[in-house]
Amino acid sequence: MQLNPRQLEAFRSVMLTGSMTLAAEMLKVSQPAVSRLIKDLEQTLSLRLFRREGNRLIPGAEAQRLFNEVDRFYKGIERIEQVAQDLKSARTGTLRIASMTALGLSVVTEGVRRFSDARPGVRTSLDVRNSTSVLELIAANQVDIGFVQILGAEYPGVDVVALPSVDAVCVLPSHHPLARKKTVDIHQLQDQPIIALSANNPLRLRLEMAMDAAGVTCRYPVETTLAHSACTLVAGGLGIAVLDPFTATYTKFPGAVWRRLAPAIPFQVSMVFPAHQQRSKIVNEFVGVMRELFEQEFVPQIDDKLNARK
């Protein structure tokens, strides 16, 4: 079997656009030409990659799996082309960042803003995903720096540098009796409905360990993967949540307030880098921006932010 690069290019364009017509426009060829390339690819693979439902083109499971590999290949080619173009045109450079959602929607975006203000010639991209996906991108050298929650085990192909930890906060409906307190004691969570993060989330695991140690039991009416969604559910009166302070302080959630939790539960995040790769000056400069952001502003002012936004 010998795959035709033009067939793969047409296949990727169809997967990206969801349409033979749009793929043809992207490739600057006719729609029948794209259809022929896809048909030839299916014959080469002896697979049916797409089915039609009305005007919609639906990829099958085989197409999805093939696309993951094809897209990874083309992104590698695009990265090589970008590096070559930077060398040719003497651009300042590029910075590729991936971040877990809680930071990617808060402190990392502020870091990008500060960095871009100081280095307008740098082309910066920010990919917001869950921590596991960020680690996969780093290990594959698809991004230069990532931000994740601390995990218990080492991840192959990844260098980890911890950032200063901050304390999780308790997010409550504004009318909740505990909202009148400055600090919520973990024993006061007894029998409360908790909007829980996903079962493998490190912060949820730390919270459950702390509750077990205190002999506290709770109800879990709703589970979500995003702290932002948890805050929205709390604001809707469905329960309370223990979350990272960045989500709580960067976004306003009418109907929700946040308080200290005692004893404190650390929310530990780390910067991650591709292993065995020399970090560029650009990456090191961005690291400096993020360290300054954590150490000089966000960590010591978390309490001020909480008080100011109550």
Image (spheres, rainbow, N blue to C red):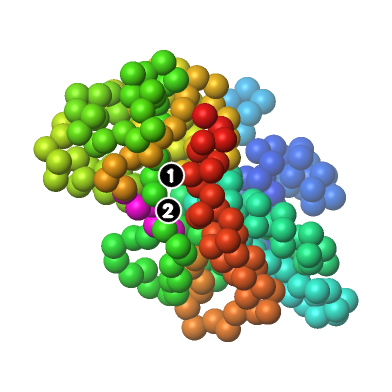
Q: Verify CB contact (< 8 Å) between mark 1 and mark 2.
A: yes
On the image, the x and y values in percent for residue 120 come to 82, 63
Residue found at the far right of this picture:
89
* Alpha carbons under labels 1 and 2: distance apart: 8 Å
Which residue is depicted at the point 81% across and 80% down? 87
Specify whether 187 is left or right of 301.
left
Compare residues 16 and 44 and report the one nearer the observer. 16
| Quadrant of residue 91 within the rendered picture | bottom right
Specify whether 102 is left or right of 127.
left
Which element type, helix, strand or loop, lies under badge 2?
strand
Q: Is residue 307 above or below residue 122?
A: above
Dot 1: few (<14), some (14–19), or many (≥20) neighbours within 10 Å? many
Which residue is depicted at the point 38% across and 72% down? 156
On the image, the x and y values in percent for residue 160 come to 43, 71
- According to the picture, the residue beneath numbered tag 1 turns out to be 244
Disc tally is 2
Q: Main secondary structure of the magenta part?
A: strand
- According to the picture, the residue beneath numbered tag 2 turns out to be 166
On the image, the x and y values in percent for residue 224 come to 39, 33
Which residue is depicted at the point 26% across and 35% down? 185
On the image, the x and y values in percent for residue 195 come to 34, 29
Residue found at the far left of this picture:
215
Give, as a single range, the part of the protein colored magenta: 265-269
Compare residues 9 and 130 and report the one nearer the observer. 130
- The kind of residue on which mark 1 rests is Asp
